[in-house]
């Protein structure tokens, strides 16, 4: 085979191709997406149908299949997962499950369950209801307005949650966890190397646990909140901008305190091995309180 | 300490409590020295009881570990790693049973728990005499168990290295080093302050974080 022929074949294989197909779905359907590398963008419309638009190489095949309530879309290349950039337009009540290796995903306006898993790439969700789960290794994760059981896990990046309600679990290893405008009744946030910020409601009967090894914990306590707060640190300090009556926990260590605010109806546990614990009132200065988002970089 | 908390401790140790209940127990434990002592006793008994049963095979330990040490079941000390052949096994007892068992085990157990926790004897040497301090037994037993789990998962990750993207492996290894530094911090602090409840729990939690990361990394290969 001559070089020009090889070049022509190579160009042909790498030329971008468009796939555009629409498939009718019933209420409460589920969209499953699998690819290797690429992007996934999801937006909503008022039709009971899923539109799949994909940009991909000629050597990649986009398979769209429907089986019962499940619409399955895969990018395939020679029997394995392939690369593609997807735009999905879906009814808002659909549930979504997307997996990829190097995949950026942005999902907007969904009122169903959401599950997104990648290795590298940022994950952004606006909406989600019921079980909401996002997992990455090396990607920032941002969730806004989700409600239900929200589970977020990454390893080497930060997590930002905004206006999330329900039960929240957020974990990373090397990155901060920033939670703003929160309405959750239960929050468990853990990092090893990074700060944690929680700014939002502390609901009566709610349970809130924040733990980091190396980083500060900022807790914004609403004026009308009632909470029993337990603070444990080894080398950090407790700094409150408002008066609290602290008592040293019986039989415990010098930097182990508990105190009650208001009626004490919420339970808050804060742990940082080496970081400070800072309690603030709404509107007071904290990272990100200057109108900009608190940084997710270390 | 009252009966309510006594019952909760057993459930807490078995991982049967919801998140809310678990936090409530941990909050109570922070304030109640008697319950902390009781929990330490219970854990030591369970660990010792486990050591008296069939010893885990060393070769496929990591698969069992991945099922046995789940973050959703904090406090469970589950020993035995034949997960591939049978369902995960927990040692679940009522408090009276545990207290009765502790008397028997005080006689029977010696170094067995430590030998069992270290599989076929690989890994760092640990004390082979039952320490006099129950709290220390609990902490060291947990540490040994987590150490064993970590070693097996690290070996599994090493074996699967070729199937993972090198950049991903690098990220995971960087983050393992971050956790290792945190573990070292906690251990160093514990050397100075061995009875510090927060440090003991922080070390345990940080080791669990490492196990969780290794589990996720190996599951992706």
Image (tube, rainbow, N blue to C red):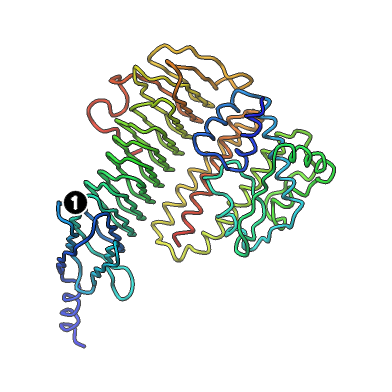
The residue lying toward the viewer, choosing from B81 and A104, is B81
Q: Position of residue A295 (x, y in %)?
A: 30, 35
Q: Residue at x 47, y 28 (%)?
A: A270
The residue lying toward the viewer, choosing from B188 and B104, is B104
Q: Residue at x 68, y 25 (%)?
A: B34
Q: Quadrant of residue B110?
A: top right
Q: Position of residue A36 (x, y in %)?
A: 31, 63
The quadrant of the rendering that contains the C terminus of chain B is bottom left
Q: Secondary structure at mark 1?
A: strand
The quadrant of the rendering that contains the N terminus of chain B is top right
Classify A125 as above or below A63.
Answer: above
Q: Quadrant of residue B169?
A: bottom left
Q: Position of residue A61 (x, y in %)?
A: 24, 72
The residue lying toward the viewer, choosing from A89 and B187, is A89
Q: Residue at x 29, y 36 (%)?
A: A162
The chain that hosts pointer 1 is A
Q: Residues within 10 Å of mark 1 (few under 14, many from 20)?
A: some
Classify A167 as above or below A238.
Answer: below
Question: Left of B29 or right of it: where is B177?
Answer: left
Residue furthest bottom in the image = A1
Question: Left of A219 or right of it: where is A26?
Answer: left
Q: Residue at x 26, y 43 (%)?
A: A127
Classify A266 as above or below B148.
Answer: above
Q: Quadrant of residue B107?
A: top right
Q: Position of residue A236 (x, y in %)?
A: 49, 24
Q: How many marks?
A: 1
The residue lying toward the viewer, choosing from A285 and B1, is B1
Q: Which residue is mark 1?
A: A43
């Amino acid at each position: 085979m001559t070089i020009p022929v090889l070049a022509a074949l190579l160009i042909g294989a790498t030329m971008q191709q468009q796939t555009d197909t629409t498939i009718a779905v019933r209420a409460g359907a589920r969209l499953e997406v699998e690819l290797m590398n690429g992007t996934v963008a999801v937006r909503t419309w008022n039709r009971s149908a899923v539109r799949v638009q994909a940009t991909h190489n000629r050597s990649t095949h986009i398979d769209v299949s429907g089986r019962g309530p499940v619409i399955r879309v895969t990018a395939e290349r020679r029997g394995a997962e392939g690369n593609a950039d997807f735009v999905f337009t879906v009814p808002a009540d659909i549930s979504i499950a997307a997996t990829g290796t190097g995949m950026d995903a942005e999902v907007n306006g969904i009122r169903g369950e959401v599950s997104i898993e990648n290795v590298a790439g940022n994950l952004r969700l606006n909406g989600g209801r019921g079980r909401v789960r996002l997992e990455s290794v090396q990607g920032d994760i941002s969730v806004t307005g989700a409600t239900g059981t929200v589970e977020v896990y990454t390893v080497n990046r930060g997590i930002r949650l905004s206006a999330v309600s329900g039960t929240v679990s957020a974990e990373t290893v090397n990155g901060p966890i920033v939670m703003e405008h929160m309405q959750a009744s239960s929050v468990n946030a853990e990092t090893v190397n990074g700060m944690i910020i929680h700014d939002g409601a502390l609901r009566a009967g709610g349970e809130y646990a924040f733990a980091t090894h190396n980083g500060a914990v900022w807790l914004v306590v609403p004026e009308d909140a009632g909470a029993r707060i337990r603070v444990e640190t080894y080398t950090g300090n407790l700094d409150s901008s408002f008066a609290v009556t602290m008592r040293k926990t019986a039989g415990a260590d010098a930097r182990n305190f508990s105190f009650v605010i208001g009626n004490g109806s919420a339970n808050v546990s804060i742990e940082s091995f080496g970081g400070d614990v800072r309690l603030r009132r709404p509107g007071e200065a904290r990272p990100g309180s200057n109108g900009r988002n608190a940084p997710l970089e270390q | 300490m009252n009966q309510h908390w006594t019952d909760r401790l057993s459930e807490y140790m078995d991982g049967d409590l919801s998140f809310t209940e678990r936090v409530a127990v941990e909050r109570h434990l922070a304030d109640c020295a008697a319950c902390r002592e009781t929990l330490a006793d219970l854990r030591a008994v369970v660990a010792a009881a486990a050591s008296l049963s069939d010893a885990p095979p060393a070769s496929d330990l990591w698969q069992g570990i991945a099922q046995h040490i789940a973050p959703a079941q904090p406090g469970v000390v589950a020993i035995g790693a034949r997960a591939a052949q049978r369902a995960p096994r927990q040692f679940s007892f009522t408090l009276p049973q545990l207290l009765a068992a502790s008397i028997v085990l005080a006689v029977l157990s010696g170094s067995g728990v430590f030998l069992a926790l270290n599989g076929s004897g690989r890994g760092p040497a640990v004390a082979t005499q039952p320490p006099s301090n129950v709290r220390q037994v609990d902490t060291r037993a947990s540490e040994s168990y987590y150490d064993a789990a970590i070693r097996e998962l690290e070996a599994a990750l090493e074996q699967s290295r070729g199937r993972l993207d090198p950049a991903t492996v690098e990220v995971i290894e960087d983050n393992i080093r971050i956790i290792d530094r945190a573990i070292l911090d906690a251990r160093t602090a514990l050397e100075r302050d061995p009875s510090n409840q927060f440090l003991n729990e922080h070390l345990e939690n940080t080791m669990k974080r490492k196990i969780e990361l290794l589990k996720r990394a190996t599951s992706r290969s």
